[in-house]
């Protein structure tokens, strides 16, 4: 589950999960829902992703989403399903999706980058809440 | 709502005093902050936390003079958008937050010898549709030329010169670009593989959001002398391009934010906001970011150069006349997201400064050697893009701009979120309204059309009037769109 958050010139997401992994997966779903018009994304291709966990959980969230953004820009793919594992030294993930098709997926916003603003990874009674804002 | 002190210290000048955050300790401002604004604008400026951000910038090591903010100031990551800050070479810092993600986002203006009477509704539509076809735009738009890694490196090291050498443009074009389209300090080896890959996919594309390509008509001349020198007259047709360094620049910024965040700790720099991450000008991290940023800036100049080439081709195709015969010369090209090493006189002393402009434009007055010979007695042209359906301006820089390290405003700035705009308007309706006003728009999508509705922005005329009234840059001409390609 995720929620889109808005600011005058910016947009971001707040995502939830029972585990940190699930919250990261939902954050990625939220990001692609902003980039597309929310159309269904089928799982036709799978990309394996590895991100070093060398700073804190907040930086890891930025790096994970930035990596997906990079793949989107370079390979013209959009993703709808994710499978994330967070270890001591790295995050390993799988992203499932297909080539971006404006007719099928709709037209959203061009996200330039993931920022540090309002960046937060938080644990509460129900699980994890992660939040970040994008530069658009 | 920001409720700190703003003291009126002159016409259109409001100061946040140095004492605002206390006179001792980490929060102490090293210099005051000065915001250019009209009284009417103050409530909207105080609406978000941008003035606090200007005060935060004033606490940074080595800042010189004042932390400035232009009338289009609004909240940004770390540094406010519309902010100008200059840092001393010895004590100062360099910060990606003071430049922004879209490195060398900028504006280019091309003039023609066409007049409004030479075009009609049908030819304008044909031109816009041809431009839309020839210049990739929108989310996920792909480059129409394929560059090898070696060529990308050459773009990063040589800027617009690379494009002209490859046949994309005229030799004279370079003379009319800020920095002649290349920051020589650029070093492509300091740009990540990832950034280059993103650049490869997007070179020569407009992008989305507030970026645009417009066919305009000059509707008003305020300064006959300067207009003549810039080659502009009433009812003339011009073309404006507003875009930046695309994914390449965004990636360079992201990569170095990570590096500089570590550097901030390493050099023991205390900052009031994590997003102001910076490193000393003379540190390895600071130097590397500066050279990588310059490479991204060179990419942006190449990007706009390729687009100019396709604009000329589109006009040739539709009007069956050579671009040379159509007089499609570049008036000028400015960047409004950049850091530069410049010489300025501070308290009567010449100093080498690292000037950060984020949502602000360089404005060198008469006699600066950096501006084209033809314009040197008038001052540098400052290009202010409006937004779809509103006006754009060309200003002339005055020596008075030196008080703000030779800087001026950059545009309008949003007042409404994209989703709110979408809820309020429908893209097709906006297109119809604009058509009634004589503006034909070809958007990459109808959604963007609603998001970018002119009413979602501050009035660019008010912003320009403040700069004019304050005497930093004065109005030369006003252009309104006839046709728009919207990413």
Image (cartoon, coloured by chain):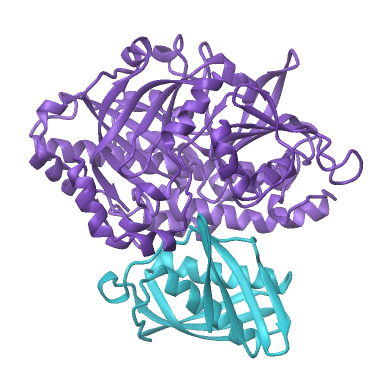
Q: Residue furthest right?
A: B24
Query: Does residue B118 appear to the left or right of B237 in the view shown?
Result: left
The image shows residue A12 at horizontal and vertical percentages of: 54, 67
Foreground of the two, B61 or B306: B61
Foreground of the two, B76 or B421: B421
Query: Does residue A19 appear to the left or right of A135 in the view shown?
Result: right
The image shows residue A102 at horizontal and vertical percentages of: 29, 70
- Quarter of the image where one finds residue B406: top right
Give the residue drawn at x 73%, y 38%: B281
- Quarter of the image where one finds residue B387: top left
Give the residue drawn at x 23%, y 59%: B428
Q: Which chain is cyan?
A: A
Foreground of the two, B368 or B236: B236
Foreground of the two, B365 or B249: B365
How many marks the image carries: the answer is 0
Q: Compared with residue B364, is residue A8 higher up or lower down, i.e. above or below? A: below
Give the residue drawn at x 52%, y 54%: B250
Q: Compared with residue B307, is residue B422 higher up or lower down, i.e. above or below? A: below
The image shows residue B113 at horizontal and vertical percentages of: 19, 22
- Quarter of the image where one finds residue B392: top left
Give the residue drawn at x 26%, y 18%: B233
The image shows residue B131 at horizontal and vertical percentages of: 21, 46
Q: Which chain is purple?
A: B
| Residue B305 appears in the picture as rendered | yes
| Residue B81 appears in the picture as rendered | no
């Amino acid at each position: 589950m995720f929620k889109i958050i808005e600011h005058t010139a910016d947009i971001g997401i707040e995502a939830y999960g029972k585990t940190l992994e699930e919250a990261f997966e939902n954050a990625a779903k939220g990001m692609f829902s902003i980039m597309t018009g929310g159309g269904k994304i089928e799982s036709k291709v799978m990309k394996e992703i590895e991100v070093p966990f060398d700073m804190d959980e907040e930086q890891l969230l930025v790096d994970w989403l930035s990596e997906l953004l990079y793949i989107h820009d370079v390979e013209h793919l959009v993703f709808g399903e994710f499978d994330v594992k967070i270890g001591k030294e790295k995050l390993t993930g799988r992203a499932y999706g297909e080539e971006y098709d404006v007719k099928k997926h709709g037209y959203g916003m061009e996200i330039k980058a993931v920022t540090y603003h309002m960046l937060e990874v938080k644990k509460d009674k129900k699980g994890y809440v992660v939040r970040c804002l994008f530069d658009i | 709502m920001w409720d700190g002190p703003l003291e009126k210290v002159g016409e259109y000048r409001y100061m946040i005093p140095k004492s605002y955050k206390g006179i001792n300790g980490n929060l102490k401002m090293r210099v005051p902050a000065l915001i250019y604004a009209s009284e009417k604008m103050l409530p909207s400026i105080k609406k978000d936390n941008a003035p606090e951000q200007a005060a935060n910038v004033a606490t940074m090591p080595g800042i010189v003079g004042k932390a400035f903010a232009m009338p289009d100031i609004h909240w940004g990551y770390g540094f406010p958008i519309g902010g100008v800050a200059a840092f001393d070479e010895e004590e100062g810092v360099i910060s990606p937050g003071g430049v922004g993600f879209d490195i060398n986002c900028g504006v280019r203006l091309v003039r023609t010898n066409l007049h409004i009477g030479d075009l009609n509704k049908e030819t304008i539509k044909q031109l816009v549709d041809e431009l839309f076809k020839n210049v990739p735009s929108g989310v996920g738009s792909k480059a129409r030329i394929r560059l090898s890694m070696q060529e990308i490196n050459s773009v990063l090291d040589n800027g617009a010169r690379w494009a002209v050498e490859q046949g994309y443009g005229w030799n004279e074009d370079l003379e009319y670009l800020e920095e002649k389209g290349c920051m020589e300090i650029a070093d492509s080896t300091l740009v990540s593989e990832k950034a280059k890959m993103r650049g490869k996919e997007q070179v020569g594309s407009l992008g989305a959001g507030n970026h645009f390509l417009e066919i305009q008509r000059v509707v008003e001349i305020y300064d006959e002398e300067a207009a003549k020198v810039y080659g502009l007259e009433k009812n003339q047709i011009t073309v404006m391009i507003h875009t930046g360094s695309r994914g390449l620049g965004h990636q360079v910024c992201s990569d170095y934010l990570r590096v500089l965040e570590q550097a901030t700790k390493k050099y023991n720099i205390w900052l009031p906001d994590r997003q102001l991450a910076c490193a000393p000008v003379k540190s390895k991290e600071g130097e590397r970011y500066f050279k990588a940023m310059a490479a991204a800036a060179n990419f942006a100049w190449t990007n706009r150069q390729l687009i100019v080439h396709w604009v000329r081709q589109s006009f040739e195709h539709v009007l069956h006349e050579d671009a040379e015969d159509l007089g499609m010369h570049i008036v000028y090209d400015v960047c409004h997201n950049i850091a530069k090493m410049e010489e300025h006189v501070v308290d009567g002393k010449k100093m080498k400064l690292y000037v950060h402009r984020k949502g602000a434009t360089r404005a060198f007055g008469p006699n600066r050697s950096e501006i084209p010979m033809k314009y040197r007695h008038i001052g540098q042209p400052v290009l202010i893009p409006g937004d779809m359906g509103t006006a754009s301006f060309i200003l002339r820089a005055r020596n008075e701009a030196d008080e703000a390290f030779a800087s001026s405003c950059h545009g309008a700035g949003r007042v409404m979120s994209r989703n709110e705009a979408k809820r309020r308007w429908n893209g097709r309706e906006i297109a119809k309204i604009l058509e009634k006003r004589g503006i034909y728009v070809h958007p990459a999508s109808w959604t963007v059309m609603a998001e970018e509705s002119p009413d979602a922005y501050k009035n660019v005329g008010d912003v320009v009037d403040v700069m004019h009234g304050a005497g930093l840059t004065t109005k030369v001409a006003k252009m309104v769109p006839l046709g728009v390609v919207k990413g």
